[in-house]
Amino acid sequence: MIEKKHIGHEFRPVTLTVEVGRLKFLAKALGITEGIYVDPNAAKVAGLPGLLAPPTYPFVLEIEALELVDLVSFLGETLGKLLHGEENFTYFGPIYAGDEITVSKKITDIIDKKGGALQFVISKTEFTNQNDKKVAETLTNYVFRH
Amino acid sequence: MKIPKFESLKEGDEIPTLKIQSVSRHTLALYCGASGDHNPIHVDLDYAKSVGLEDVIAHGMLSAGYLGRMLTNWVPQSTIRSIKNRFTAMTHIGDSITCTGKVTEKFEKENEKLVRIEMQAHTPNSQTIIAEAVIALE
């Protein structure tokens, strides 16, 4: 069982560079072919400062900042018990290649379900760019099957 | 891209669907590397069996990525205010994935005209994601 003492825990913020290659790789994996996501020249022609990160990209930063295996081990659990319950994105601005995004993650709740057979670990993660503008926030529900 | 007008949309309108013919092991390997979600349950058959599954399962966020792609095929990404994804079932190797969405509400908030889009991803056997997006339109 995951201990409730972890509620409120804030992980150390991590600053990550949004890489062109990584964005292209993610676009390839998702089958995205539109120029602003895969071709830096097309992004430039469209008036953007760099490749545009697609809507689910904050999730990539979220796990780059804190790998799932490290999150799970912090909670005293194992990966095999983990299912992804929810991933909710709120957007306040775009993320482009070349941005420096600071990722700050906090555990906001731990909820027992089905008499403890399941536990939901809820986190809130904020993404702030190099200009101190918050560009996105995610709410994640990690489901553990005991 | 012809951006839909707030006034021209009505509740029940469907947005253009996105269909993925088949999820392959190659797709999952690419998504593992690209997303950084290295959970072996998605790419290592031996590991998947060791935790009681018959085979590897797809990343939920892969299908969420397809839902996002359906949205950005329809409207510029700058119009998307939020996307909520709730994962409801597993996606298996060989499954097709169909993404659909429809307008469920039109409303105004903080001087923006917003439409709520209820979305789903489903495989031949299951609904795998229930999702909702809020889009700001002129």
Image (cartoon, coloured by chain):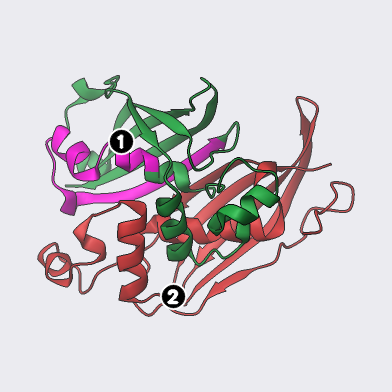
Q: In the figure, is residue B38 to the left or right of B90?
A: left
Q: Residue at x 48, y 38 (%)?
A: A98
Pinpoint residue A27: horizontal percent, then vertical percent. Answer: 48, 59
Question: In the figure, what tint was chain B given?
Answer: red
Residue A44 sits above or below residue A3 on the image:
below
Residue B3 shown left or right of residue B45 in the figure: right
- Left or right, A9 with respect to B136, comes to left
Establish if B94 lies above or below A87. Answer: below
Label 1: how many Cα within 10 Å (few below 14, some 14–19, many 20+): some
Viewport quadrant of the N terminus of chain A: top left
Which region of the structure is painted magenta? A61-90
Query: Viewer-proximal residue, B66 or A86?
Result: B66
Label 1 resides on the chain identified as A
- Shade representing chain A: green
Residue A54 within the magenta-colored segment of the rendering: no
Return the mark for residue A65. Answer: 1
* Residue at disc 2, secondary structure: loop
**A63 in magenta:** yes
Residue type, label 2: Asn
In percent of width and height, residue B67 lies at 55, 58
- Given the current orientation, which residue lies at the most extreme right position? B7
At 38% from the left and 46% from the top, the residue drawn is A60
- Say if B94 sits above or below A96 in the image: below
**Residue B128 visible here:** no
Q: Position of residue A95 (x, y in %)?
A: 54, 39
2 vs 1, front mark: 1
The amino acid type of the residue labelled 1 equals Ala
The residue where tag 2 is placed is B125
Instruction: Count numbered badges in the picture.
Output: 2
